[in-house]
Image (tube, rainbow, N blue to C red):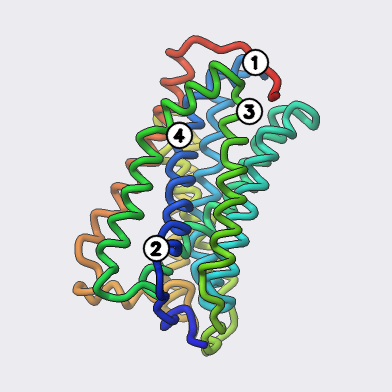
Amino acid sequence: MDSPGTGPQVKGYGLLILSISLATFMSSLDGTIVNIALPAITEAFSLSTTTVSWVATSYLLVLVGCVLVFGKVSDTIGYKRIFLSGFAIFTLGSFFCGFLPEFVFGFPSLVASRIFQAVGGAMLAAVAVAMITAYIPAEQKGKAMSIIMLFASLGTAIGPTVGGILTQYLSWHWIFFINVPVGIFAILLGAKVIPSTTPPVAGTGAFDKAGAAFAFVGLASLVFVVSEGEALHWTSPIILGAAVLAIVTLGLFIRQELGHADPLLDLRLFKKQELFPGKPSAVPRVLQLSRGSATCCRSTSNTCTAIPRRMPA
């Protein structure tokens, strides 16, 4: 069989697009549905809004920090393993988020479960779009991407409404439990329709562990600065320290990648403008999303009426 990078184009690819679309839908839904439940979580654990905002921030930090790593790993073990493993971790993490805080360690177990969930989210994000390139015929790639983006937009749009309904009429736990049946369905569907491919030829060097560490620390620090700068004040020692850490580690990451035989990210590709039309604007959009998510977390918690906690049915 072919490698993921040159994988077989799938006949009857509609179900494959649906499987990938479910990943983008769940990721987008999770990004907005959680914010609506923050007032209820604040009330349930009797914590400040700043503390509760870590339910969203911790997820974002791990997600951003791990995407590059899992993208590289998928080149070695194949897209299907990463995709299905990511869905399994994301689904299990969602269940832990709703279940564990009531019985084990309270709020810390919720944040820990969100971190675990974010690992699965990073695995999905790392390979979802790449599978379109690998498995969908060239003449259908545009249509496939449109469907995936439609699902992503739908998840973002309905998240606040669904989150409000679940939180008001059931409990905040159900904003996480709702992911479980969708995740199970997506795993079963993906196992059937995603091609099993042989890993590509190994790279010319060992896995870039130093580059992975620099990327994780640098990106996570950068997102932390953008998302928490306003709340903690831009000139506070924590934010300034995180900014310096981000600059230093990302600088080391660039140096590491340029000198590594098998880099985590081949930075020389960015010299080829024809490969990245419009991509320079993507970074500001991601950072703005990070800041917007954190701002939404705090404003939602400050302005919405706290909803009494109900145990999951």
Which is in the foreground here, disc 2 or disc 4? 2
Residue hosting label 3: 173
Q: Earlier in the sequence, mark 1 or mark 3?
A: 3
Q: Do labels 1 and 2 touch, CB within 8 Å?
A: no
Distance CA(mark 2)–CA(mark 4) = 41 Å
Task: Give me the disc on residue 66.
Answer: none
- Dot placed on the residue nearer the N-terminal end, 2 or 4: 2
Task: Work out whether 228 lies above or below 22.
Answer: above
Q: Around disc 4, counting alpha carbons within 10 Å, would you say few (fewer than 14), some (14 to 19), or many (20 or more)? A: many
Q: For residue 10, which quarter of the picture?
A: bottom left
Mark 1: give few (<14), some (14-19) or many (20+) Cα within 10 Å.
Answer: some
Q: Position of residue 249 (x, y in %)?
A: 48, 59
The structure residue drawn at horizontal position 44% and vertical position 34%, both measured from the top left corner, is 32
Rounded to the nearest angstrom, the CA distance separating label 1 from label 3 is: 9 Å
| Disc 4 element | helix
In the rendered structure, which amino acid carries the disc numbered 1? Arg
Look at the numbered discs 4 and 1 and tell me whether their residues touch, using CB distance below 8 Å: no
> Closer to the N terminus: mark 1 or mark 2?
2
